[in-house]
Each structure stands twice: as C-alpha cells, then as structure tokens.
Image (cartoon, rainbow, N blue to C red):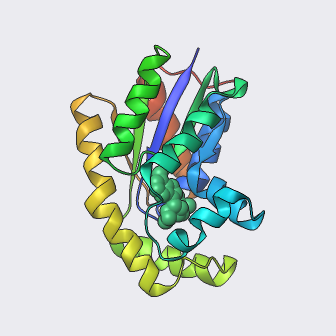
Amino acid sequence: MTARLLIVGPQGSGKGTQGVRIAEAFGVPAISTGDTFRAAIRDQTPLGVEVKAIIEAGNLVPDEVTSAVVRERLAQDDAAPGFLLDGYPRNLGQVNDLDAFLESRDEQLDAVIELSVPRQESIDRLITRAAEQGRTDDTAEVIAHRLSIYENETAPILGVYGERGLVVSIDGVGTLDEITERIVTALVARGLTPQG
Ligand code: AMP
C-alpha cells in the first residue's frame, strides 16, 4: 500500500504539525521544503547560502532550485512507499515539475489535503510562533507578504488538483488531535490505509 500525499494550507494553518502526524500514520516520510531550506541555512551549505535572503524576505525560492531539491529527496529509498510533501508544490510551475517527475516514475498522487483556517487565525498563530521560535521570517510585515503569496500563487494549485478530484478539504480549526482525526478519516474514506 502506498500513500502519496500533499498537504496545502496557509502559513499558520498547522500543516507542518499535521503533516508529520499524517505521514507517521500512513508510514511515509514527511518532506517539508521549508524545513529543508532552514536546515541548509543553519548548516551554511551552498543551498543555504543561495536561499537565505529569499526566505528571510518571505519570497519563494526559484522553482528550478526547489524542484531539484524535492526530486532528489523523492528519489531516496524511504520515499518508495510514498511521501507526504509539506509546502511543495507552492505554485503552478511546481505542479508541472511534480507532474513530470511522478509521470517519469509511473506514480500518481493519492490525495491533496487542504487545511483551511480563517486568515486572522493564521496571523494570530504566526505571531505566537514568532514569539516562541523567533523565526526570522515571522515578523508582521513578512507574515502579511507570505500570506499574500499564498493567496495569489499557492491557492490556485488547489483548483488544478480539485479538477483532478484529489482535494480533501479539512477544517483546520480545533485541537491537534481533532484535526489529525479528521484528516485520517477523510483519507481512509478515499481508500488509504493507515499503518499499524
Ligand atoms: P514554510 O516553512 O513552508 O512556510 O517555508 C518557509 C519558506 O521557505 C517560504 O516562505 C519560502 O521562502 C521557502 N519555501 C518553502 N517551500 C517552498 C517552495 N515549494 N517553493 C519556493 N519557496 C519555498
């Protein structure tokens, strides 16, 4: 049984936390492009040096850079039974890149989890996270910029996946456990089987 999943939602929707939980439930690696970039910046790798200023400004890393990182990660053995991608694709160009990669391997996505939260709730959560974690891209100005990129560039990918019948829309307001349960239930209803 494979599970090839995406989780899509605005910053502050809890997609990172839920992504890890859902990946674990279905026995696949959670792959977060944001975490990958932050680790590269922390370790001062060539990738980190290349993307640092872009991320601090809240802009998107160029598609060719991001898609190359994802392709390399998805080609690793632990992603053979599937994966949960968090934060990728982030625009229509990246949807095309992922389509081409999956097609070359004769693989298909099983579902795209859309995590919805009201805009003000996202902002409140991001401001709390900024105070707790001190992320350099969590300032009020950069948060507003990232949310507008989400609305303009990322939200349209849900239209494309929706036409393919892949989108599972989940209400992202509730406790962590409630939201995980909603997602698992919706994926099981689509024929996916959790591990264990
Ligand atoms: P995230 O943790 O998903 O909010 O990502 C943090 C930052 O990393 C974003 O604001 C972007 O600067 C960059 N990033 C993450 N994923 C992508 C992606 N798929 N395409 C371009 N930039 C990305």
Identity of the residue furthest to the right in this view? 43
Q: Residue at x 69, y 65 (%)?
A: 41
Q: Residue at x 34, y 50 (%)?
A: 91
Residue 149 is situated, as x and y percent measured from the top left of the image, at 34, 66
Q: Position of residue 114 (x, y in %)?
A: 38, 46
Side of 49 where 97 appears, left or right: left
Any part of residue 117 in sight:
yes
Q: Position of residue 183 (x, y in %)?
A: 48, 40
Looking at the rendering, in which quadrant would you find the C terminus? Answer: top right
**Residue drawn at the location 44% of the way across and 62% of the way down:** 60
Asked which quadrant contains residue 123, the reply is: bottom left
Quadrant containing the N terminus is: top right
- Front residue (pair 138, 180): 138
Q: Say which residue appears at 44% left-offset and 77% top-offset.
A: 143
Tell me where residue 97 appears, x and y as whole percent.
40, 36
Q: Is residue 118 visible?
A: no
The mark total stands at: 0
| Side of 195 relative to 146 (left or right) | right
Using residue 166 as the reference point, say whether residue 195 is left or right of it: right
- The vertical placement of 148 against 22, above or below, is below
Vertical side of 85 occupied by 129: above or below:
below
Taking depth in this image into account, of 80 and 53 the one nearest to the observer is 53
Residue 81's image quarter? top right
